[in-house]
Amino acid sequence: MFSSLSDSLDKTFRNLRGVGKISEKNISDALREIRIALLEADVEFSVAKDFIAKVKDKAMGEDVLKSIKPGEQIVKIFHDELEALLGGDQTPLDLNPPARILICGLNGAGKTTTSAKLANRLKKEGRRPLLIACDLYRPAAIDQLAVLAKQIDVPCYT
């Protein structure tokens, strides 16, 4: 899901960077491609629509159209809006020990990697996380979690 979204965005931004002078049509075409990519990545329609509207408002400003590298400016606007949408600041986790966090989701959604990243964050906060592998459908996930746990020096029960 994320790789196809990333590929679509890379292609769109590459095309924008290659354009010498940005026009309203270039921006509209790029935003249409971005909207389609977001929807194909299962981003909720109203979220994608509002996000594209915010990017378009900022991208149509004179500063962008007259800037030296307008394509790069639009990429920056996209990045800033995406960061704002996802929440730029980290929120502290309010966990009373012993806390249990269950990570669940679709195949290939990134549960194993996210679990290791979360454990690493908790470790950096001075907590003592323990990873427990219990993926019944992908045995390699158990090995992957053990490898990731070893890399971040967190115990893993398999």
Image: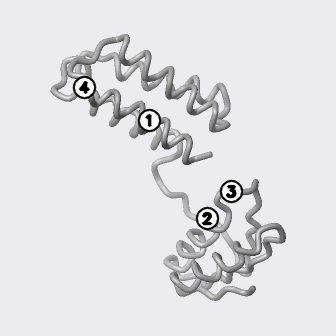
The amino acid sitting under disc 2 is: Thr
User: Which numbered circle lies on residue 70?
Assistant: 4
**Tag 1: Cα neighbours inside 10 Å, few (<14), some, or many (≥20)?**
some
Please state which of the two labelled residues, at mark 1 or mark 4, is closer to the viewer: 4
The location of residue 40, given as percent across then percent down, is 64, 33
Please state which of the two labelled residues, at mark 3 or mark 2, is closer to the viewer: 3
* Along the viewing direction, whichever of 131 and 2 lies nearer the viewer: 2
Earlier sequence position, callout 3 versus callout 2: 3
Please state which of the two labelled residues, at mark 3 or mark 1, is closer to the viewer: 3
Q: Quadrant location of residue 148?
A: bottom right
**Tag 3: Cα neighbours inside 10 Å, few (<14), some, or many (≥20)?**
few
- The residue where tag 1 is placed is 81
Q: Is residue 90 above or below residue 139?
A: above
The location of residue 101, given as percent across then percent down, is 73, 69
The location of residue 123, given as percent across then percent down, is 54, 80
Q: Are marks 1 and 2 in contact (CB under 8 Å)?
A: no
Please state which of the two labelled residues, at mark 1 or mark 2, is closer to the viewer: 2
Spatial CA distance of label 1 from label 2 is 23 Å
User: Which numbered circle lies on residue 108?
Assistant: 3
Earlier sequence position, callout 2 versus callout 4: 4
The amino acid sitting under disc 4 is: Pro
User: Which numbered circle lies on residue 114?
Assistant: 2
Which element type, helix, strand or loop, lies under badge 2?
Answer: helix
